[in-house]
Image (cartoon, rainbow, N blue to C red):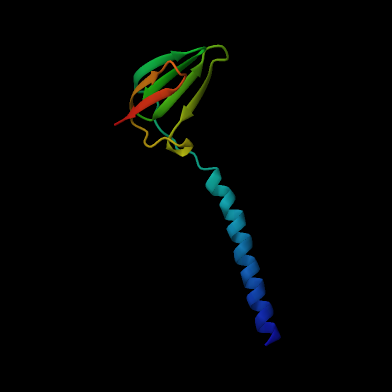
Amino acid sequence: MIFQKIRYGLFFLLLVTLNIAGSENIRSWKTITNLTDIEEMVLVGDEIWCATNGGVLTLDTRTKEFNSITNTEGLEGINITCIEYDARGYIWNCIK
């Protein structure tokens, strides 16, 4: 009886350990898309924001660094057809 409880306890501990270790991989997912088909661009300070068929692409004109924003980072979709910058400082995009 005691060995059965120990076995169940070890099995439960193994499941919890695997679940915790596996959850780290979920946060590190990245969507790989094609950002070369640019639909529209807008200049925001020193950055150029581009609406592409693979998400939003930003270019910092000072550092020459690119950054992509896709559904992994929170976009509803990745086929962005337009992008706008409003007077309040918000960047808006349209999803096809």
Instruction: Please give the name of the residue rendered at 44% of the width and 19% of the height, measured from the top-left corner.
Output: 49
Instruction: Please give the name of the residue rendered at 36% of the width and 36% of the height, measured from the top-left corner.
Output: 77
Q: How many marks?
A: 0
Above or below 8: residue 76: above
- Residue 23: x and y in percent read 57, 52
Above or below 61: residue 51: below
Toward the viewer: 38 or 87? 87
Toward the viewer: 34 or 41? 41
- Residue 42: x and y in percent read 40, 15
Above or below 55: residue 1: below
Judge from the rendering whether residue 33 lies leftward or rightward of residue 27; answer left or right: left
Residue 51, quarter of picture: top left
Residue 31, quarter of picture: top left
Judge from the rendering whether residue 35 lies leftward or rightward of residue 81; answer left or right: right
- Residue 61: x and y in percent read 52, 12
Q: Quadrant of the C terminus?
A: top left
Instruction: Please give the name of the residue rendered at 67% of the width and 88% of the height, measured from the top-left corner.
Output: 1
Instruction: Please give the name of the residue rendered at 43% of the width and 15% of the height, measured from the top-left corner.
Output: 87
- Quick one: which residue is furthest to the bottom in this view? 1
Toward the viewer: 89 or 84? 89
- Residue 4: x and y in percent read 65, 83
- Quick one: which residue is furthest to the front in this view? 88
